[in-house]
Structures are given as structure tokens and as C-alpha cells.
Image (cartoon, helix red, strand yellow):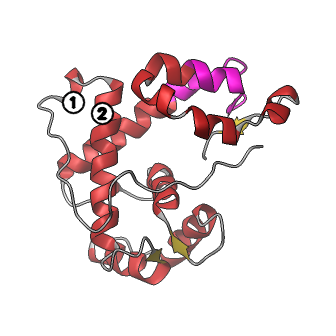
Amino acid sequence: NVTMPKFNSFRSHRHQHPPPVLDDAEDQTFEQLLSEAFAIMENRYAAMDKDGAGMIFFRALEVQLALHGFNDHDTLQKVFEKVDRDKSGFLDFSEWLCLMFLWAGTGDYENILESPRDCKVVEKAFQTLEKMWQDYDANHSRKFSYGELENFLSEQLPAIHKKSQGIIDTVFTEAERNAGKEMSFPR
């Protein structure tokens, strides 16, 4: 398996940016849906990262979730430890995105996000992403080869595809491509 590199948001976490409001989620393209969901998650991360240091510690997350009705310490600890890939004890933005993706199987987005609409947008984005990943996974291994990832990005996220080539080449070095390495889907 290939490990995804860490990345930071394209925007500063010190300022919240309103997500683009698209009238009907059904009329959105996949790219628009992901963009809106990303903005929602970025804004929530910024709100929880009160000092703008790019870190959300377990206890701060636990308190915020308790305020929204989630009080299962052990379950939260397991998910937190799973996404805290570098074992730093805090979540950077890329780890936060992983937590958000996995949250659908753990709790309810209403435990994290501020509005029912935000919950709906993020949930729909991740459901759509999961379905598309499955569609592009030719051998149904829950892993992407370099070619499968390239096809997915070029066909579904063309604006991002060209800009992400450096990340793709980091994830899949030429030696790893030649050795048949694959990238696992989050689970």
C-alpha cells in the first residue's frame, strides 16, 4: 500500500470562507459538490482550530462533539487514532479530512457540522466519491492502481487533475508504478 502525503488546505485556516451556495445539490457537478463540501469541512476545521495553528487535539474534538450529542469516548478515540497517521496526538487538515470521510460509519455529521444542509452536502459528497471510486476500481480490490487513479481524476476532476500531477507522482513513484503498487481506499 502507498501512503498519501500530508497536505495543507489551499486557504489559510485563520479566516473562515463561506462555502459556495449552490441552489440544488441535485444539479451540481461532482466537482462543484466536492468543492462545496471541502469548503464546509475547511470552515469547520478553522472554527475548531481556534488559534490557527493547524492542529485539533483529541480533547478539543471530544468536547466539541459532546456539545453536539456525541459522547462515545472509546469510539472517538479509535477513529482519532486511525486517522492520526503520524501519531502526533492532533489532527492536521489532511487527517481531519480522513476523519470526516470515516465519520459516516462512526457517528452522524450533525455531531460535527453546524447545519443540516452542511451535513447533507458533506454526506452526499462522500457517498458520491465512494461510488465513483468503486466504479473506477476495475478489479474491485478497494485499491487504485496508478492508471485507475489517473482515469478517475482525468474524467471526474479534470480541473484538479493537471494541478495534482505532482501529488500523484509522489504517491506513485515510477518504481512503485512498475512494481504494481496500489493505493487503498480509506475505510
Extreme residue in the left direction: 23
Q: Disc 1 marks which amino acid? A: Ala
**Vertical comparison of 124 with 24: above or below:** below
Magenta segment range?
131-151
In percent of width and height, residue 40 lies at 27, 51
The quadrant of the rendering that contains the N terminus is top right
In percent of width and height, residue 160 lies at 44, 30
| Quadrant of the image occupied by residue 68 | bottom left
**Vertical comparison of 162 with 59: above or below:** above
Give me the residue at 43% from left, 25% from top. 157
Q: Nearer the viewer, residue 129 or 178?
A: 178
Neighbour tally class for label 2: few under 14, some 14-19, many 20 plus, Cα within 10 Å: many
Q: Nearer the viewer, residue 1 or 140?
A: 1
In percent of width and height, residue 89 lies at 58, 78
Give me the residue at 46% from left, 57% from top. 8
Extreme residue in the right direction: 179
Neighbour tally class for label 1: few under 14, some 14-19, many 20 plus, Cα within 10 Å: some
| Label 2 sits on residue | 33
**Is residue 139 within the magenta segment?**
yes
| Label 1 sits on residue | 25
In percent of width and height, residue 181 lies at 81, 34
Q: Nearer the viewer, residue 20 or 80?
A: 20
**Is residue 25 within the magenta segment?**
no
Q: Disc 2 marks which amino acid? A: Leu
| Disc 1 element | helix
Cα–Cα span, label 1 and label 2: 7 Å
Mark closest to the chain's N terminus, 1 or 2: 1
Q: Are marks 1 and 2 in contact (CB under 8 Å)?
A: yes
Give me the residue at 27% from left, 59% from top. 43
Q: Position of 51 compared to 140: left or right? A: left
| Residue 137 seen in the current view | no
